Amino acid sequence: MKFSPAVSSLQPSATIAAATKAKELKAQGKTIYEFTLGEPDFNTPLHIREAAIEAMNSGKTHYTPAGGVPDLLKAICQAAKRDYNLDIEPQNVVVSNGAKHSIHNVLTALCSPGDEVLIPTPYWVSYSALVELAGGVPILVEASEDDGFLPSVEALRAKVTDRTRLIMINSPSNPTGVVLPVELLREIGELAVEKDLYVLSDEIYDKLLYPGASTQCFMTLSEEIAKRTIIINGVSKAYAMTGWRIGWTIGDPALIKAINKLQSQQTSNPCSISQYAAIAALTGPQECVGEMLQEFEKRREYVVGRIKDLPEVSFVEPGGAFYVFFNVSKHFGRELPGGVTVKDSTEFCTALLEQAQVALVTGDAFGAPGFVRLSFATDMKTLEAGLDRLSEFLKN
Ligand code: PMP
Ligand code: GLU
């Protein structure tokens, strides 16, 4: 079968591919220590699930407005005021089928063929693919481990051309967990103002911050910066709601209207029941977020301690999200258990899975060769056993 150029050149999501492979091996009866997907292992809190049941039982099972029900748009505005002291109106918000869909819609709405989008590395796997799907050109701007994975404004500035349309940032970051200092966020915003660009600020992990880390919603940095800002957020990570598929975009009413138009042709609307669940998440008790965060924090402490003890491995400590991204390149070209040698992170992940049954995601997928990503959004017992095996694998 002949496919369109867009689909022919598209790679499957590496995070999802790694998780699928681990699940296939598990289905064959193998024990796999799986640290691939970035999704909370907790069940969605009870009051949110109950709101969904109530929505179904009261007949909220029909099409909704394309960009989300008015009560959810209102709840997002109220949460923005409560959480960031940000004043927005429902006309600034559009709800989509998960934050991934929100990002795709923003790029589809803004990019003309050949428009350039600056993406600091390491970046979340789907960014470059979604830019390409929208007809844009991803321009990667390297941020190195030595610089704590903080992108340099000068490096970004050097890549701005007549075709540059927007800068995509993600703090706390997937895959590094790095939280960009507020001053750096402001400098990036000022560059966007100076060069007449937009900033897509993906803040999906903003509620998952560990002690000592702090951030600020990009739209609150200054009035001028706010005009150039597009915020992406959703309920997947903070409320353990990955399967419900609710994300949103906050931006200029003209952009929101364009995305509404797109969505009306594309998906009609996000799932009605999930929208009511998201209202409960945003307006209900927020303690559940803190409780899950506390659990993540324990795991983070544990995992960081264990990875520090691994031979010839380095990393930048995550200040948020639930990933550790570590450099295993010193192990390339050496004999590993099973007599194998590997030349890159992708081969490293394959050898680790085959020899030690530990599943990680290759850094190659995040634009960072030499690294691998471990998601610690899983239970302590699996983390302990998996890290024991990883440690044995590297010491061998
Ligand atoms: N942005 C980042 C940085 C992510 O890690 C994810 C994880 N899936 C998303 C967006 C998309 O989230 P959602 O589940 O809401 O589509
Ligand atoms: N964002 C998560 C991850 O990076 C979920 C998988 C995906 O959507 O790519 O693992």
Image (tube, rainbow, N blue to C red):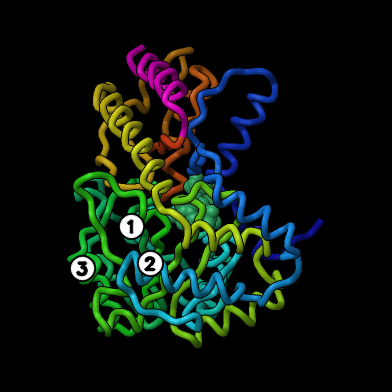
Measuring 71% from the left and 77% from the top, which residue is drawn there?
Answer: 265
Where 383 sits versus 123, above or below? above
Residue lying furthest right: 1
**Residue 370 seen by the camera:** no
The quadrant of the image that shows the N terminus is bottom right
Q: Nearer the viewer, mark 3 or mark 2?
A: 2
Q: Residue 229, percent across and down?
A: 37, 76
How many numbered markers are drawn? 3
Lower position in the chain sequence, tag 3 or tag 2:
3
Which residue lies under the disc numbered 2?
201
Marks 3 and 2 close (CB-CB < 8 Å):
no
Describe the element under mark 2 as helix, strand or loop.
Answer: strand
Amino acid under disc 2? Ser
Instruction: Tell whether 189 sits left or right of 286.
Output: left
Measuring 45% from the left and 74% from the top, which residue is drawn there?
Answer: 250
Q: Compare residues 243 and 186 and report the one nearer the observer.
A: 243
Amino acid under disc 1? Ser
Q: Residues within 10 Å of mark 1 (few under 14, many from 20)?
A: many
Instruction: Tell whether 263 sits left or right of 210.
Output: right
Amino acid under disc 3? Glu
Spatial CA distance of label 1 from label 3 is: 19 Å
Lower position in the chain sequence, tag 1 or tag 3:
3
Lower position in the chain sequence, tag 1 or tag 2:
1
The label number, if any, that marks residue 154 in the structure image? 3
Marks 1 and 2 close (CB-CB < 8 Å):
yes
Which residue lies under the disc numbered 1?
171
Residue range of the region highlighted in magenta in the rendering: 378-396
Spatial CA distance of label 1 from label 2 is: 8 Å
Q: Residue 148, percent across and down?
A: 22, 48
Spatial CA distance of label 3 from label 2 is: 19 Å
